[in-house]
Amino acid sequence: MQKIAIIPISEAGSEVASKLKRELGASILPRTDVGQRWNDFDAFIFIGAMGICVRTIAPYVKDKHEDPAVVCVDSLGQHAISVLSGHIGGANDLTRTVSGILGAASVITTQSDNAGLWALDTLAARFNWTLVAHASQRENADGPLVAHASQREKADDPLVSHASQRDIMQSAIIAFVNRKPTALFIDAHDDGTEYLLNSLPEHVTVVSSLDEVDQRYKLLLVVSPRLQRLEAFLDEPSGRAERPTTLQFVPRVLTIGFGLAHQAGPAETIYNEMEQGIMDRDIYPCARQWCTIDVKANEPFVALLREKGETVRFFTAEELAAVDVPNPSETVEKHVGTPSVCEAAAILGSNHGKLIIPKVKGKNWTAALAIDHSYLRPQTSDLRPGHIEIVGAGPGDPDLISVRGRKMLEKADLILYAGSLVPKALTDCHKPGAVVRSSADMTLEEQCALMKEHYDKGHFIVRLHTGDPCIFGAIQEQMAYFDQNGMSYHITPGISSFLAAAAELRSQFTIPERTQTIILTRGEGRTPMPEKEQLHLLARSQSTMCIFLSAAIVDDVQRELLQEYPEDTPVAACYHLTWPDQKIYRGVLKDLAKIVHDNHFTLTTMLVVGEAIDNRQGLSELYNKHFTHLFRKGDKS
């Protein structure tokens, strides 16, 4: 969290200052103290005239890499202006935050923001990448600056000073914001590269190989964990009139598995040796996590990793022993109960990913490197890896799918939707050329085969399920297939029909002091229910019950519920919730089956049972003026 100081220039800005202090957890500071406290805060927000703000900070401004963020807000709270350190210091983001709190207009003057371009100097921090830099050994003195190697470079490579690295970045920014031809080479994929690919400016060309980078390009941006590939490109003799200014970002997509001798040390020496061992194999050791066997949890080296802020994961000997590795060891198995620690830990930690550096041995340590398949660039002409997004479609109305879900549909190469439950209108936002298929008449094997076909082409696939896919979504068997085939996938949640039922019934399904539980279940049809989850047993709590997929067996449902609920318990039969032909009928439990039969309800009918329906009795303590909680102190009078 940023440490923020608010400086009210005059009494006129006190109300705005108080509001920002409360919302941002900031401190109020007299203007006369700014100089002596300049290095104590991450950001300063001046409330008052811009001229006074500028004259106050002018003697202390040094460099955008060191200066705190400065924002100026007029005393009426109508405008918030980013004054200093907009990108690196975060003043632009803070300006937007302040504007949101006050309802003010944001004034941001940095060119990249106003032109909709990437802020190159914030990408590393934003996506947890490492920007690595040194001057090329073959660089001409008057040639462009190149930033491309590790800050922990081999001893015989000249490291760049911070000033030189800043010059390199500044050279890149100037070329980029002036829309000079730029090449983008991506060798691994994560959220950051997804952002770049989805917001590609017109002057940026995605290249599949560094061989495609010719003299027309003035800037080269590389996202890759590899060392040799870029160095060879920069050092090779070529016909280029000049080399492009080059920035390399190293994404943290790798998993390091390691093994240790008992109480191995010195820990810092082992750390340096492991990193050098990885770099000797042309990979930057920028790991997202370090993994080993659980019996090493108290080793000095593990303590060092934690001090450095690294994520450390542990696996049992049984878990590690179940992994096939290329270099098993009988000696290791004799001591810790598994034939592999470093290789097995790397593979497990990367979600059974690809082992890209097998066991490397040191004096008292071993290490291996693996990468999750989802981060890999496919060996196809498509630069994106295949990916499957399981998306919750919501209850039916296309306006009720999440913003993220809609974006997924808009960029999908294949949309495979549950046609028996999801309105086709939800897929109308597909891009030109996308394949849109209903899975209603397909078997599991046919669905998986279709998704695998598109996945292997590097396509983006949306598997669209009704409501929220994690509730009666039948996605477990699909995920098992994805896991078995090392396929990248993710779940985007959706609004479940039970939530739509509450909204359309205008009912709160939890009543203070009467019912605080919502049961989501189904009746027993062709799919058997576990004995302990029979409806009559669940009904004993008389909670609000939302019953899915059970209109066809409503007589059985009513019979079981009447064993515990009173016959006059409120019920609602909700058909096609939020669809154009939505129908909702209220009644009491003894008439539930009749309501369903009389209206010929079948699929996509939600049955709701409980006294919460239409209830308006009972008060929550949350807004009681006498109730104290984290955000408000109660009135004791």
Image (cartoon, helix red, strand yellow):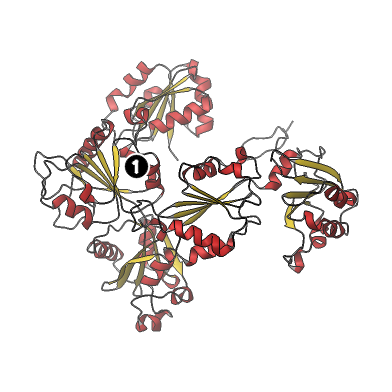
Which residue is located at x 32 percent, y 28 percent?
111
User: Viewer-proximal residue, 335 or 39?
Assistant: 335
SS label for mark 1? helix
Q: Is residue 12 left or right of residue 329?
A: right
Q: Is residue 67 visible?
A: yes
Q: How many marks can you see?
A: 1
Check the image and name the residue furthest to the left: 141
Which residue is located at x 40 percent, y 41 percent?
198
Which residue is located at x 47 percent, y 17 percent?
75
Q: Amino acid at mark 1?
A: Leu
**Residue 473 percent across, percent down from the top left:** 63, 56
Above or below, comparing residue 68 to residue 524 in the picture: above
Q: Residues within 10 Å of mark 1 (few under 14, many from 20)?
A: some
Q: Is residue 534 left or right of residue 633?
A: right
**Residue 510 percent across, percent down from the top left:** 75, 45
Residue linked to disc 1: 123
Picture quadrant where residue 555 is located: bottom right
User: Viewer-proximal residue, 382 or 36?
Assistant: 382
Above or below, comparing residue 271 to residue 458 in the picture: below
Position of the N terminus by quadrant: top left
**Residue 228 percent across, percent down from the top left:** 21, 57
Position of the C terminus by quadrant: top right
